[in-house]
Image (spheres, coloured by chain):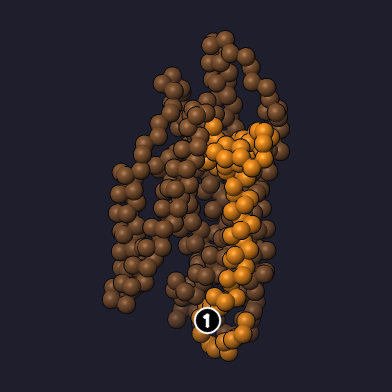
Chain colours: A brown, B orange
Amino acid sequence: MMRSLLIRGMLVGLAAAALAYVVAWFLGEPQVALAISFEEAKAAAAGEAHDHEVFSRTVQETLGLITALVVYGVAFGGLFSIVFAFAHGRIGDFRPRTTAALVALVGFAVIYVVPFLKYPPNPPAVGSEDTIGSRTTLYVTMILLSLLTTAVALYAGRRLAPRLGGWNATLAAVGVFAVIIGITYVVMPEVNEVPGDFSATVLWRFRLASLAIQLTVWGTLGLLFGGLTDRALGRRTAGVPTAVGV
Amino acid sequence: MANVAVPSGKTAPIRIPVREIVPWAVFAAVLGLALLYFVGAEQGATSIISGSTVHEFVHDGRHLLGFPCH
């Protein structure tokens, strides 16, 4: 059971990466190219020598990007299937596809959207080489705090469920999450290294593209994994009359 | 799958026992985090392998997936 769920998760992650590549190609790469030409124009104006390239841009935007997306998709696909296994039957009487969609929604919000709002992704040409260490630490810390807050909110929700009922306990848990994350946003240090003359349009479109790519990954994980698992588990109980409308 | 519930008329969702999930969870977490590290941070904030080959190869993915790249 677990083995097939994990394999399915990783394969769905592969499919998610393929779809994400299409989105990245049409929405993300044009903005990356604009940012790189800005970077090069600036370097040329400053009279700096052109950086030695390890890989050509063509390799970076095809093989390199595909590899990154596949690794990311397969890793999160596997982790997604594990969380699904813990969640299914324990967060409510949901069908597998509903559990999967909920897990994906929460995963997308907690792992990507919450850190995104505090430390949004930046295209090339934005960000100083010297602060990469601290920026990475802050970004990872934000993800970990978001996960920790989710655990607190889940615990609060479970404790409140008998008194408030499922729906209101869920709302209360979301409220707890929002308050703690709000405090975290205020406390965590600000990062803004966008050059004053960098195109606001390119920055905005780049960030939207990143959001779209992540939405594609998590959307595919939730819906495709959910659909396939629904069918697989449905077959297990084939012959048992389904309680429609009960 | 030590305890398989006897199918009844109701379709209560199958609960996978925690004991069965844990070993797979450890496996997926270790593998997953190692993979994510290479996409997200290697040869940026920290380096296990010297040089910038990994960084340059996953460059676009790192930017577009939301990680700080450089």
Foreground residue among A56 and A168: A56
Location of residue B60 by image quarter: top right
Side of A113 where A44 appears, left or right: right
State which quarter of the image contains the N terminus of chain A. bottom right
Location of residue B61 by image quarter: top right
Side of A179 where A239 appears, left or right: right
Which x, y percent locates residue A135?
Answer: 46, 38
Per the image, the residue denoted by label 1 is B11
Which x, y percent locates residue A89?
Answer: 50, 75
Chain bearing tag 1 is: B
Which x, y percent locates residue A79?
Answer: 58, 60
State which quarter of the image contains the C terminus of chain A. bottom left
For mark 1, does the 10 Å Cα neighbourhood hold few (<14), some (14 to 19), or many (20 or more) residues?
Answer: some
Q: Is residue B13 visible?
A: yes
Q: Residue at x 31, y 59 (%)?
A: A176
- Name the secondary structure under disc 1: loop
Q: Is residue A209 visible?
A: no
Q: Residue at x 67, y 36 (%)?
A: B50
Q: Residue at x 58, y 24 (%)?
A: A36
Amino acid type, callout 1? Thr
Foreground residue among A26 and A197: A197
Instruction: State the count of labels.
Output: 1
As displayed, is residue A188 above or below residue B33? above
Location of residue A151 by image quarter: bottom left
As displayed, is residue B10 above or below residue A150? below
Which x, y percent locates residue A245?
Answer: 46, 78
Foreground residue among A4 and A220: A4
